[in-house]
Image (tube, rainbow, N blue to C red):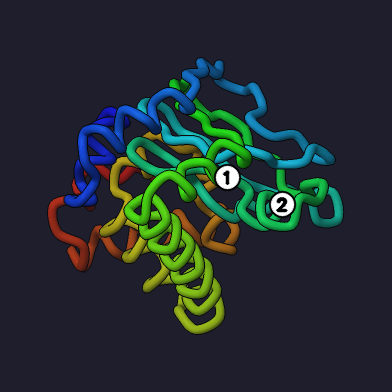
Amino acid sequence: MNIIDYFKTFGYLTVEEINFAMDFFIPEEIKKGAFYLKEGQVSNKVSFIEKGLFRLFYQLDGEEKIMLFFSESQLMADYFGFLTETASIRPIQALEDSLIYSIEKRNLNKLFDYSKNWERIGRQLAESAYVTSVLRANRLLHDDYNTRVKTFLEESPSLMQRVPQYMIASYLNMTPETLSRVKRRIKRTGDVKDTIHNVKG
């Protein structure tokens, strides 16, 4: 999905409002392995991913812990750093060659001032980011390994093929060996339909 089609999915933005916004969204190509945001940088932009894949992670005792994946048709930012204007402790790195469209915070505020519809979208996106963060925390606290893997397969089946398994294990807060064992168990039971046939490991 391209960025204009994404804006149209909200259903209430006018052509004029979309055209006004496009003057502020700057295209960027990011190569696999390059950083969208480095540790210590202040996040001052939000980006729409037209093509590609990213991970947001942090270091704990010398080990990388993955918090989020961002892929096509999603908005991407270190939202905590973006809102607080503080240096990020969670870098964001491209896992594939990617094409994104970025808007700086000062220009995003111009959109909110320009129309009530853009202000409404800002509220919707903030609410969605909050719900996503709470849902992820709840799943890590309350879901067992089987449920975590099944939910990931159901909600993000393509990522199982695009992301190294050790990164998926980190995201699900389990070891790679546990992930492989759970996937084999799910294959045998057939709990996840239409995705499990392509799962490796």
* Left-right relation of 56 to 185: right
Where is residue 24? Give x, y as percent. Answer: 48, 27
Look at the numbered disc 2 and give the secondary structure of its residue: helix
Which residue does the numbered mark 1 point to in the structure image? 77
The image quarter containing residue 14 is: top left
90 in relation to 136, above or below: above
Label 1 – label 2 distance at C-alpha: 8 Å
107 in relation to 35, above or below: below
The amino acid marked with disc number 1 is: Ala
| Of residues 174 and 107, the one drawn nearer to the viewer in this rendering | 107
70 in relation to 132, above or below: above
Where is residue 94? Give x, y as percent. Answer: 56, 29
The image quarter containing residue 128 is: bottom left
Mark 2, Cα crowd under 10 Å, few <14 / some 14-19 / many 20+, is some
38 in relation to 141, above or below: above
For the point 46% across and 42% down, which residue is it? 111
The image quarter containing residue 43 is: top right
* Left-right relation of 199 to 139: left
* Left-right relation of 44 to 166: right
| Of residues 107 and 63, the one drawn nearer to the viewer in this rendering | 107
Q: Which numbered dot is residue 81?
A: 2
The amino acid marked with disc number 2 is: Gly
Extreme residue in the left direction: 194
For the point 49% across and 84% down, which residue is it? 142
Q: Which numbered dot is residue 97?
A: none
For the point 81% across and 56% down, which residue is it? 60
Where is residue 41? Give x, y as percent. Answer: 79, 37
Mark 1, Cα crowd under 10 Å, few <14 / some 14-19 / many 20+, is many
Quadrant placement of the N terminus: top left
For the point 60% across and 34% down, which residue is it? 104
Circles 1 and 2: CB distance less than 8 Å?
Answer: yes
Where is residue 124? Give x, y as percent. Answer: 38, 62
